Image (cartoon, rainbow, N blue to C red):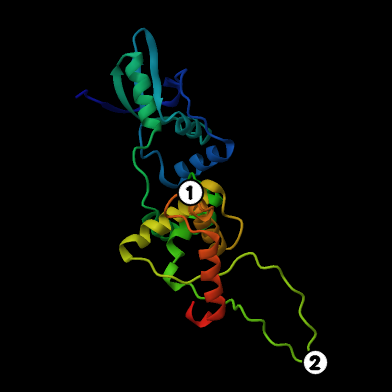
Amino acid sequence: MRKIEYLNVAVTELRKNPWNTNKVSPENELKIRESLNRNGMFKPIVVREVEGVPGFEILGGEHRWEQAIELGESEVPVANLGVISEKQAKEIGLIDNARYGSDDTLGLADLLKEIGDVPELQSFLPYGQADIDAIFNASVIALDDLEIDESFEKAPETEDEAPLPKVAKTHAQMRFKVPIADAERITALIAKTQKDHGYTTEDELTNAGDALVHLLGDHLRRPAGTLAYNDDEIEATLDAALANPDDV
């Protein structure tokens, strides 16, 4: 295994590589800067040496280096890999920008709540409002705690009361239980679907329900096959529910 040299070097001794594909928005540049303000440069910048060229070429950490300069830092920590081929340098650059794992959404939500509130988290973490909402929703969706607050029967009106204007209903709450072993996977899947497909503009339960409907899309459209329900079966089930709402 190659020996790595850890150094503190002047920011002027570093330069960008010409193939970096990792682009950062101005908003996230500010987040990187705030992260450096809060926690310092705890991860060294990965660099290599190029024969005949003074200084070091950055393989990983270009944006942190730029924000360190913006903050007025004169030195930064580096992990120097020495003289390596351009092919290997490109491989290392790609690996440094990549992430092999994925978060346990419920665990991540708990961890974020321990660190701070949403405005604070957004100031230095690479998450937008929709990202954080989706993550937090995973920790509050409890499918077996949902209550039915809708009735199929029309409430009686008194003679002295003017009828209230009708508001078109778009959603209904449902109550059901799932196996404990599947609960976390279901809530995490719903949260991921919310994030991936933009179900973040309504209240938490509506967002979660819309994501669940999205996941069940093919089944709700009755795909061809032996497991599909026909209209008569669905109508019969609905009639039975309407006739005996207390059993639903």
Q: Position of residue 96 (x, y in %)?
A: 37, 31
Q: Which residue, given by chain and number where applicable, does mark 1 sit on?
A: 224
- Judge depth for marks 1 and 2 and give the one in front: 1
Report the disc number at residue 160: 2
At label 2, the amino acid type is Asp
* SS category of the residue bearing label 1: loop
Residue 200: quadrant of the picture: bottom right
At label 1, the amino acid type is Ala
Q: Is 22 left or right of 106, judged from the image as shown?
A: right
The furthest residue to the left? 1
Q: Is residue 94 above or below residue 218?
A: above
Q: Residue at x 55, y 70 (%)?
A: 238
Marks 1 and 2, Cα distance to the nearest angstrom?
Answer: 53 Å
Q: Position of residue 21 (x, y in %)?
A: 48, 25
Q: Is residue 193 visible?
A: yes
Q: Residues within 10 Å of mark 2 (few under 14, many from 20)?
A: few
Report the disc number at residue 35: none
Q: Position of residue 83 (x, y in %)?
A: 30, 15
Q: Is residue 109 visible?
A: no
Q: Is 174 left or right of 155, judged from the image as shown?
A: left
Q: Is residue 200 above or below residue 155?
A: above
Q: Nearer the viewer, residue 209 or 110?
A: 209
CB of mark 1 within 8 Å of CB of mark 2?
Answer: no
Q: Residue at x 70, y 68 (%)?
A: 168
Q: Is residue 46 above or below residue 99?
A: above
Q: Nearer the viewer, residue 116 or 8?
A: 116
Residue 173: quadrant of the picture: bottom right
Q: Earlier in the sequence, mark 1 or mark 2?
A: 2
Can you say which quadrant of the picture contains the N terminus?
Answer: top left
